[in-house]
Amino acid sequence: MEKLKRIKPVIVFHLVLNAIIVVFITGASYYHVPLEGLKDHAIYFLHLCALQSTVAGILYVLSLFKWTFRVVFSILFLSYCGFSFWAYSQDISITRSLIQGVMETKPDIAIDLITIPYFIFYLVAIAVLIFILNWHGRLNRRKGFRIFIVPAVALIIMFFVFERKQYGIFKFRLPYNVVVALDDYYEQPPFKLEQKIPPVHSGTDSLKVVFVLGETVRADHLGLNGYNRNTTPLLSQRKDIISYSNLFTSKTITATSLPQILTDQLLTDTIGSYTSLYSVVNDGGFKTTWIGNQTMEKSYLPIVETNRDIILVDKYKSVFSFDKELDGVMLKPIDSLLRLNDKQLITIHMIGSHWWYENRYEDRHRKFTPVIDSKYIPSLTKEQVINSYDNTVVYLDYFLNEIITRLEKERLPTFMIYVSDHGEILGEGGKWLHAQEDDALKNPGYILWFSESFRQWYPGKVTAIEQLKNSEITTDVIYPTLLDLLDLQVSEGK
């Protein structure tokens, strides 16, 4: 009895500690599992208990060291709560893509994901953390703390035994999937740019091109592609628009999709050095300008920097601002550039249809209602989310039409290419947004327009584009298509 009395405080502490971890972290990996009947629930409950037992072993060893526990546990607990909230609220999987999104997404984008429920969840987590640390500090580590070392180590070993028997049985669930995702992220081969490129021959001395990089636009939500809503009323009235409904990509976040689109990297390439589109275009005698309504991520910054000029329209915007500039503000620098006589490639990087949708369009483009009124997605209806998303596409229609209207006034041949970096999940499988794995993300919008003078000068090029309209293609075509339309030939060999 005396021995039990001595170790009872330790047992109670760890039982409560593990229950808290289940509620705040581990349980998030099981919350959305569809189960039918008592048997299914019992099996998954046993699985949860087994997984948490391995976590309990780690927690026990960590608790043996007062200050190590205070520092390390605090950092881990709050970090994991950040992931578990999204796993609970949106059933998001913790993968390399998500980690890359977390590591490389700009603060002005990330702040839009901070909601009142998220803030409350974090405040509660902090309060619980303080409770745990105070309780742990009052425990007498001389009485009973070391008695369970051997069982704790055995529980840790159990993780590796189970994983060896059935790969992924634990490691792809919280908290282990964060470690796996981080490892995958830091093991990625570095993206390298070729510093030397072969000679480039230009077949034209007069051409103005606008290359629009969209954000999060699905091809199947474009009215041009037969969507049951006319989200493209202006472009649909034009007879000279070519819109592809079957462009596909495997890159589902901006950090990986833009480097692939803007270089000669293929979707199947995993390692190597690649040539920037702008390096080739510069050598072809074009003036290259990047106009961005997004601050840049490190994954594609080196590519952007190969432009001759860079203009960021939100350069001085506060990261806490909820009235970010609309993409329309980029029309003014476009006007200034088009007044120049140089042959040009102007790249426009849109904020597009990125969440939070209500900040992406003007009131006059609110064609579909009701719209979202909260940033906490579980509190919204699917109709609200899709309505707001489709309104961003209506604004895209306006924006692209404005660009085309300007290009139509040019005496020289002109054309516009629009391609979105990836799509968006709009409730498929109960999921939303992107940085996940889902087919809804892999079919981005792709639109082309050619001026009459361009069609007259290069009828063969336009015909080739039109003939591919209904074919299934990938974003591998963007780089060579642009070089061909710019009438640039690169000598063979890298």
Image (cartoon, rainbow, N blue to C red):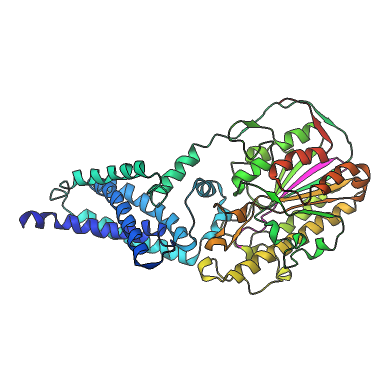
Residue 485 x, y percent position in the rendering: 82, 41
215 sits left or right of 378 in the view: right
Q: Is residue 324 visible?
A: yes
Residue 58 x, y percent position in the rendering: 28, 47
Residue shown at the point (85%, 57%) measured from the top left: 405
Residue 432 x, y percent position in the rendering: 56, 60
Residue 249 x, y percent position in the rendering: 65, 47
96 sits left or right of 256 in the view: left
In the depicted structure, whether residue 69 falls above or below residue 405 = above
Please identify the dominant SS of the magenta region: loop
Identity of the residue furthest to the bottom in this view: 370
Residue shown at the point (54%, 34%) measured from the top left: 189
Looking at the rendering, which quadrant does residue 125 occupy? bottom left
53 sits left or right of 76 in the view: left
The magenta region covers 340-356
Q: Is residue 326 visible?
A: no
In the rendered image, residue 234 lying in the magenta stretch gets the answer: no
In the rendered image, residue 349 lying in the magenta stretch gets the answer: yes
Residue shown at the point (64%, 37%) measured from the top left: 302
Residue shown at the point (63%, 67%) measured from the top left: 386
Q: Quadrant of the C terminus?
A: top right
Identity of the residue furthest to the left in this view: 2
